[in-house]
Image (tube, rainbow, N blue to C red):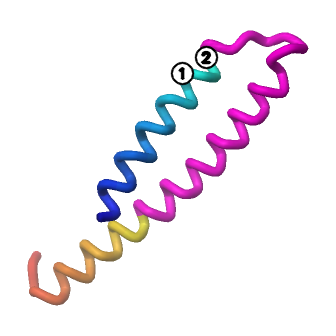
Amino acid sequence: MYKEILLKLEIIESELVDAYNTGHDGEINSDSLHYIDCAKDELYELKQLIEQKISREEKDHKELYNIK
């Protein structure tokens, strides 16, 4: 389940990067670029938490079934 969530977050990350890269630095879009940056920061934190959860679950699974 977490791997599917992580995949969706990676897709969202890609879309945010594209949105940022197609924006123009000017007064009109500077607020938009700021909000995209903030969303990317939140996304990175969420991805990190999910990656840690996946890693812990895989480790727990290996320990439970004595997998090396």
Q: Is residue 57 magenta?
A: no
In the displayed orientation, state which residue is furthest to the bottom: 64
Dot 1: what SS? helix
Tell whether 17 sits left or right of 35.
left
Where is residue 14? Give x, y as percent: 47, 31
Image quadrant where residue 40 sits: top right
Rendered position, 56 above or below 25: below
Rendered position, 27 above or below 31: above
- Report the amino acid beneath label 1: Asp
Task: Name the image quarter holding the N terminus.
Answer: bottom left
**Residue 45 or 7: which is nearer the viewer?**
7
Mark 2 — residue?
Answer: 21
> Could you tell me what secondary structure mostly forms the magenta stretch?
helix
Mark 1 — residue?
Answer: 18
Mark 1 and 2 residues: CB-CB less than 8 Å, in contact? yes
User: In the image, what residue occupies the spot 68% across and 14% down?
Assistant: 23
User: In the image, what residue occupies the spot 35% across and 47% down?
Assistant: 7
User: In the image, what residue occupies the spot 42% across and 37% down?
Assistant: 11
User: Mark 2 Cα within 10 Å, few/some/many (few <14, many 20+)?
Assistant: few
Q: Is residue 28 magenta?
A: yes
Where is residue 53? Give x, y as percent: 40, 70
Q: Which residues, given as a range, are shown in magenta?
A: 22-51
